[in-house]
Image (tube, rainbow, N blue to C red):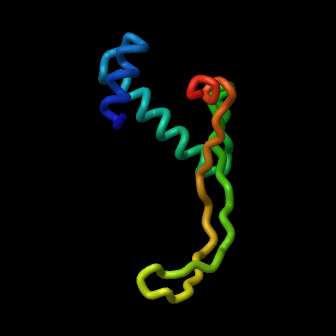
């Protein structure tokens, strides 16, 4: 499912116009980005949690040359599914 298909599905499920569904989805994405950038976690009970985690620097290997390279540390976003979401997917 791509973004436009998700907007269509949200509009249908919530009985909204596509324009309102797009605004709601865009707002959710923006709020999520801003919160994660601040280091906050976002918990949606039963659905899941978005958290920012630190990935340590490590050594890697260039697959083309085989030469060892240093991969720098960075922050990554992780999603941990909640029980309701996990049960729905089973």
Quarter of the image for residue 18 reads top left
Residue 65 % position (x, y): 44, 87
**Residue 54's spot in the image, x, y percent?**
68, 61
Q: Quadrant of the C terminus?
A: top right
Q: Residue 64 or 47: which is nearer the viewer? A: 64
Q: Is residue 10 visible?
A: yes
Question: Dividing the image into 4 quarters, which one contains the N terminus?
Answer: top left
Closest to the observer, 76 or 60: 60
- Residue 87 higher or lower than 56, as above or below: above
Is residue 22 among the parts visible in the rendering?
A: no
Q: Extreme front residue here? A: 90
Instruction: Please report the residue visible at 31 percent of the width from the left and 16 percent of the height from the top.
Output: 17
Residue in view at x 63 percent, y 30 percent: 86
| Above or below for 3 versus 77 | above
- Front in this rendered view, residue 27 or 81: 81
Q: Quadrant of residue 10?
A: top left
Against 12, residue 28 (above or below) is below
Relative placement, left or right, of 12 versus 70 is left
Report the residue that reaches farthest toward the top.
15
Image coordinates of residue 75 in percent, x first then y, are 62, 61
């Amino acid at each position: 499912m791509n973004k436009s298909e998700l907007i269509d599905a949200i509009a249908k499920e919530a009985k909204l116009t596509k324009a309102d569904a797009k605004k709601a989805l865009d707002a959710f994405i923006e709020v999520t980005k801003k919160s994660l950038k601040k280091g906050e976690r976002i918990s949606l009970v039963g659905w899941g949690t978005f958290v920012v985690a630190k990935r340590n620097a490590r050594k890697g290997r260039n697959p083309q040359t085989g030469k060892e390279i240093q991969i720098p540390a960075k922050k990554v976003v992780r999603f941990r599914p909640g029980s309701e979401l996990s049960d729905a997917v089973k």
